[in-house]
Image: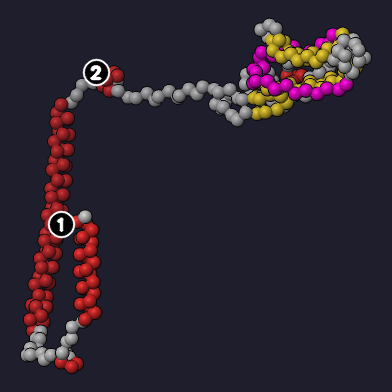
Amino acid sequence: MLAVYSAASCSSDPIYGYTPNVAVGGSSWSMSESVLGVAPVSGLDISGVIYRYTAVKERADPFTVTVQNEHTGGGYIFRETDDWSGKPGQTISKAIPIDYSPIRYWGQGSIETTGLGSVEDPQVVYTYRFIEPEVEQTAPPLPTLYSVLDDPYAQTAEVDREKFLKDDEEVSKDDEEVEKEDMEKALATGDADLNMAIGQTGMIAAMNPVTMHNYYAMSIPGGMYQETVILQGGEIKDNRRAFRSMANDRLHNQMVEEQWRW
């Protein structure tokens, strides 16, 4: 049962459900929590009406059955009529979908009949959707910030000028000592870097004589290198096939040029 809703959170997922048979107590009913099984609160919308009953009548007799709900503002918010005139009595079931309609508009429900006949075993059920209403979240107040201009003691207190100047002088001396220590550290670091650079230069200078000496000391044997390739037969003959191919290429080029002239 959905009896109450929480206002602590902003919103929640929709809850879908249906009521018990509201016509179990008779042909009329109220849209109260005791009948619906849910509290008629904001966020509860009716989405459909399902009803079932048995019409008891003679075939030729006129007879109508109307399932309805009054509108809280006047008239009817729901009304469905079945005309049994000229028809034999039997059991009927209907499901009527309704656009989500807030429960506050739904008034007294009832089953009304006209003509000759009666209704037996009536059943009326409402389907609903419940969405928890959104609750506005108020931002917490900002903390109070201290302002010296609002401090009455700061506005009326006298300033000890000599003490202020003395404190300022001591702070300046402390800053000078810190700057001096930083300068000494920087110089010490610079000297270390310079010594390292000098040491590396010395190592390179000491390596160069050995490396260059080995390079210049390398000797390549000179003299005359005799040809070792021997030509078989002592004569290189012309390639006749190449000559024929060149002649064919020349003739082909002449034929192409003649075509372009035309």
Where residue 49 appears, x then y in whole percent? 73, 21
x, y percentage for residue 78?
Answer: 71, 14
Colouring scheme applied when the structure was drawn: secondary structure
Q: Determine whether, in the image, residue 76 is placed left or right of residue 204.
A: right
> Vertical placement of 160 versus 113: above or below?
below
Q: Secondary structure at mark 2?
A: helix
The residue tagged 2 is 156
Outermost residue on the front side: it is: 262
Q: Residues within 10 Å of mark 2 (few under 14, many from 20)?
A: few
Q: Is residue 50 visible?
A: yes
Q: Which mark is residue 38?
A: none
Q: Residue at x 13, y 43 (%)?
A: 176
- As drawn, the residue found furthest toward the right would be 58
Q: Amino acid at mark 2?
A: Thr
Name the amino acid, label 1.
Answer: Thr
Along the line of sight, which residue is nearer the eye, 203 or 244?
Answer: 244
**Residue at (13% x, 90% y) in the render:** 227
Res. 228 in view: no
Against 120, residue 231 (above or below) is below
Q: Residue at x 87, y 16 (%)?
A: 87
Can residue 67 be found in the magenta stretch? no
Q: Chief secondary structure of the magenta span?
A: strand
Crowd class of label 1 (few under 14; some 14 to 19; many from 20; radius 10 Å): few
Quarter containing the N terminus: top right
Q: Which residue is mark 1?
A: 189
Q: Position of residue 179 (x, y in %)?
A: 14, 46
Please identify the quarter of the rendering in which residue 40 is found. top right
Boundaries of the magenta span: 90-114
Residue 102 colored in magenta in the image:
yes
The C terminus is located in which quarter?
bottom left
CA separation in Å, label 2 and label 1: 52 Å
